[in-house]
Amino acid sequence: MKLKKKIELGDLFELETSKGKAYLQFVKYPKDTSEVEKIKVFYSLFQEEPKSIEKMVVSEDYFYLDFPLKAAHKKNIVSFVGNVALDKEFSCPKYYRTENPFGEGWHIVNSETWERESVETLTEEQKKLSPWGVWNDTLLIEKLENNWRLYNWI
């Protein structure tokens, strides 16, 4: 049995969808066991692995997500393809958004304090905020196959 390597910041993983291969980059370790890994998800789906994963990870076409990457890797849901080091100045976004579960509008969530601000209508800047919360592989695949984008999630 082949042992899986420990995941490291910058690791790039492939996720199979019915419309092609999706790529995810590991960008933040969980603070504790109540959290999962933070990943950068690239929107583009590929029929074959891109020739240069380095060029792909500098794309502006992505969003961030909490995703159980370590577990997905252990269960062979995602497969390791390489590592592209994160910039020394890299940091994950502080703010994320989620639909208001109690009615109309949105919650803007501070990921450091978990404080929420309710807004009825998103500003152009808030429309660029990644989703707050954990997605599993099934939901992520569904969203990618259906061409989900931050800018049309309004």
Image (spheres, rainbow, N blue to C red):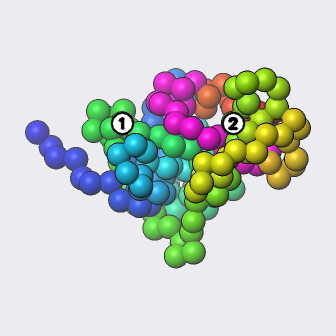
Position of residue 133 relative to residue 110, above or below, is: above
Circle nearer the N terminus (1, 2): 1
| Pick the front one: 88 or 18 | 88
In the orientation shown, which residue stands out farthest toward the bottom?
Answer: 88
Left or right of 45 on screen, residue 10: left
Give the x, y percent position of residue 51: 49, 54
Of residue 144 and residue 111, the one placed in the foreground of this image is 111
**Residue 17 shows in this picture:** no
Q: Which residue is mark 1?
A: 72
The amino acid sitting under disc 2 is Thr
Q: Residue at x 80, y 44 (%)?
A: 127
Q: Nearer the viewer, mark 1 or mark 2?
A: 2
* Quadrant of the image occupied by residue 117: top right
The residue wearing badge 2 is: 98
* Viewport quadrant of the C terminus: top right
Q: Residue at x 49, y 24 (%)?
A: 138
Residue positioned most to the left? 1
Which amino acid type is shown beneath numbered disc 1?
Ala
Question: Which residues make up the magenta segment?
Answer: 127-142
Circle 2: is it few (<14), some (14-19), or many (20+) Cα within 10 Å? some
List x then y, in percent, for residue 59. 65, 57
Question: Whole-percent x and y of residue 69?
Answer: 40, 42
Q: Quadrant of the N terminus?
A: top left
Q: Is residue 136 magenta?
A: yes
The correct choice, above or below, for 89 with respect to 23 in the image is: below
